Image (cartoon, rainbow, N blue to C red):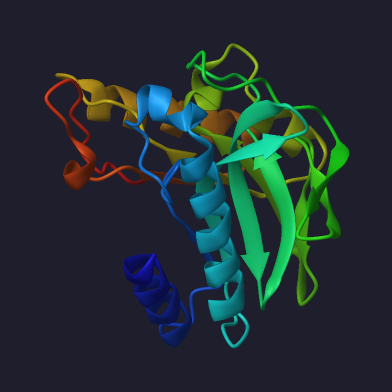
Amino acid sequence: TQSIIKQMKLATSEHIEVAIFPELSLTGSSNNRLFYNETLIKESHKQLETLIEASKELNTLFSVGLPYRHLSSLYNVMAIIFKGQLLALIPQQYPNSSHFRSGPTLTYTNFNGQEIPFGTSILFRNENDHSLLIGVEIGQDFWNIVPPSINHVNAGATLILNGSSHIEIMGEPQKRRELLKAHTYKTKCAYVLSSSGTNESTTDSVFGGHSL
């Protein structure tokens, strides 16, 4: 968490308006069945509270990944944070793991006694620049036949954020780059992808930290 806070402060010091961290960045994405552990879930929520508090004096919109329990189901979400507020929780629409459930289009969830927007269709507009409308999708969402970003762009989004933890295999970075170029050409929007770094790698999975 402290390393994330350090990067948050650096982003604001360099006048970055929007910063995105990888999918499940608060816990790591290679926990497998540990995602069912309530201690892990509760601790990730506590760390999210810490990030929200740390963002109070920072003039940057942050997107941070974590596992989140809504009612009785577990979701892979990106938390959208700005100036000490949790604006929304965006769940993955097309999970590629049996641990997580597909997110609803739009509902509300209780986080620390507050009703927070929770859904895949939520967009964020910059109040100082109305031409900047931000949509969010997560990891494998992008690889679906109709990714959430298509709906976001149809609703007016001009920037898509994707927190990812895609496993690296031979030729994958180039394929991802080419697909993303084609996608942004077709949708006429900007796209930012942040992927899990090499420190996330295990004996089973290799992550390359590919960011675009």
Residue 68, horizontal then vertical, whole percent: 62, 40
Tell me where residue 62 appears, x and y as whole percent. 56, 63
Q: Give the x, y percent position of residue 102.
A: 67, 20
Residue 141 visible (yes or no): yes
Does residue 132 appear in the picture of this structure?
Answer: no
Residue at screen point 33% across, 46% down: 211
- Look at the picture and state if 192 lies above or below 107: below
Task: Identify the residue at horizontal 48%, vertical 17% (top origin).
Answer: 97
Question: In percent of the image, x 79 and y 33: which residue is there?
Answer: 154
Q: Nearer the viewer, residue 153 or 202?
A: 202
**Up-down relation of residue 129 to residue 45 (above or below):** below
Q: Observer-nearest residue: 66 or 12?
A: 66
| Image quadrant where residue 30 sits | top left
Relative to 163, 107 lies left or right: right
Q: Quadrant of the N terminus?
A: bottom left
Q: Tell me the quarter of the picture where residue 75 sits.
A: top right
